[in-house]
């Protein structure tokens, strides 16, 4: 039986965190645990029986990735999800719909993003069934194979704002994994919803500059092709 941990990243937004947590609690089973990783200021944390307190100093999204990559309990799970707190729309059978597409060959896997992604490839493809291989997975609600988490340890510390979608997608493939987007279940994401094209382009330019600065000096990804999602998706999919 595949064991999964879903970890919600919490930063000064208890209302959204508790909304996400409440939806995911409905999906919890003996083999699917829910956690909240909280890095909020006093009074703004999300208090739950499953909260892991990371301290009050702002470590950013990247610092939360660092924690999960080095989390001792990760080895008890086959897949570990790092979920933005402003995601929602998790169905009661969310994990039941994800599990058939999780196996040892998959490095990164994500539900489709029905609203709030900056990349068209994350949108549900056609009828809400099945899954597809993808060379790019946006880091809104990805689940990582624990063996890929181990391989990611030398990459720490991660870029503070977590702009690592492209690097990790290619990193996963280079380590012999395939990546998947699951159309059988989709979620919503508040942050990118209704974003104008010019604002989207400005944000993507910021991502690019920040990511390239982070890649500099990290030998294992330094020679990663300077590709962005449209180009990555045009690459031959791993067999």
Image (cartoon, grey):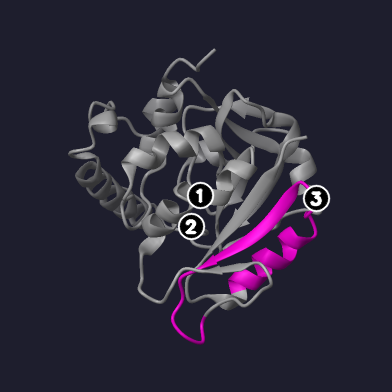
Dots 3 and 2: beta carbons under 8 Å?
no
Q: What residue is pinned by disc 1?
A: 117
Residue 169, compared with residue 71, is above or below; it is: above
Q: Which mark is residue 158?
A: none
**Place of residue 216 in the rendered image (x, y in percent of width and height, measured from the top left):** 18, 39
Q: Quadrant of residue 239?
A: top right
Q: Are marks 2 and 1 in contact (CB under 8 Å)?
A: yes
- Residue lying at 48% horizontally and 43% vertically, measured from the top left: 138
How far, Cα to Cα, is label 3 from label 1? 31 Å
Query: Mark 3 Cα within 10 Å, few/some/many (few <14, many 20+)?
Result: few
Closer to us: mark 3 or mark 1?
Answer: 3
Mark 2 sits on what residue? 192
Magenta region includes residue 15:
no
Q: Secondary structure at mark 1?
A: loop
Q: Give, as a single range, the part of the protein colored magenta.
A: 16-44
Q: Secondary structure at mark 3?
A: loop
Q: Quadrant of the N terminus?
A: top right
Q: Quadrant of residue 55?
A: bottom left
Disc 3 + disc 1, Cβ < 8 Å: no
Image coordinates of residue 96 in percent, x first then y, are: 79, 42
Q: Is residue 131 left or right of residue 97?
A: left
Q: Residues under labels 3 and 2: Cα distance?
A: 33 Å
Looking at the image, residue 228 lies above or below residue 115: above
Q: Can the viewer see residue 238 in this picture?
A: yes
């Amino acid at each position: 039986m595949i064991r999964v941990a879903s970890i919600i990243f919490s930063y000064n937004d208890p209302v959204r965190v508790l909304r996400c947590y409440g939806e995911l609690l409905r999906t919890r089973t003996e083999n699917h645990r829910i956690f909240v990783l909280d890095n909020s200021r006093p009074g703004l944390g999300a208090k739950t029986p499953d909260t892991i307190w990371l301290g009050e100093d702002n470590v950013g999204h990247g610092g939360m990735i660092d924690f999960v990559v080095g989390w001792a309990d990760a080895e008890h799970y086959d897949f570990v999800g790092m979920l933005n707190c402003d995601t929602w729309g998790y169905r009661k059978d969310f994990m039941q719909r994800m599990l058939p597409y999780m196996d040892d060959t998959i490095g990164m896997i994500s539900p489709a993003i029905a609203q709030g992604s900056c990349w068209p490839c994350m949108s549900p493809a056609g009828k809400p069934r099945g899954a597809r291989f993808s060379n790019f997975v946006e880091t809104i609600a990805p689940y990582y194979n624990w063996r890929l988490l181990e391989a990611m340890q030398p990459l720490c510390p991660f870029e503070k704002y977590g702009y690592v979608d492209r690097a990790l997608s290619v990193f996963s493939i280079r380590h012999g994994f395939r990546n998947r987007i699951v159309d059988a279940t989709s979620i919503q994401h508040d942050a990118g919803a209704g974003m104008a094209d010019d604002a989207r382009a400005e944000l993507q330019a910021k991502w690019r500059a920040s990511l390239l600065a982070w890649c500099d000096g990290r030998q294992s990804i330094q020679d990663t092709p300077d590709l962005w999602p449209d180009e990555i998706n045009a690459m031959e999919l791993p067999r």
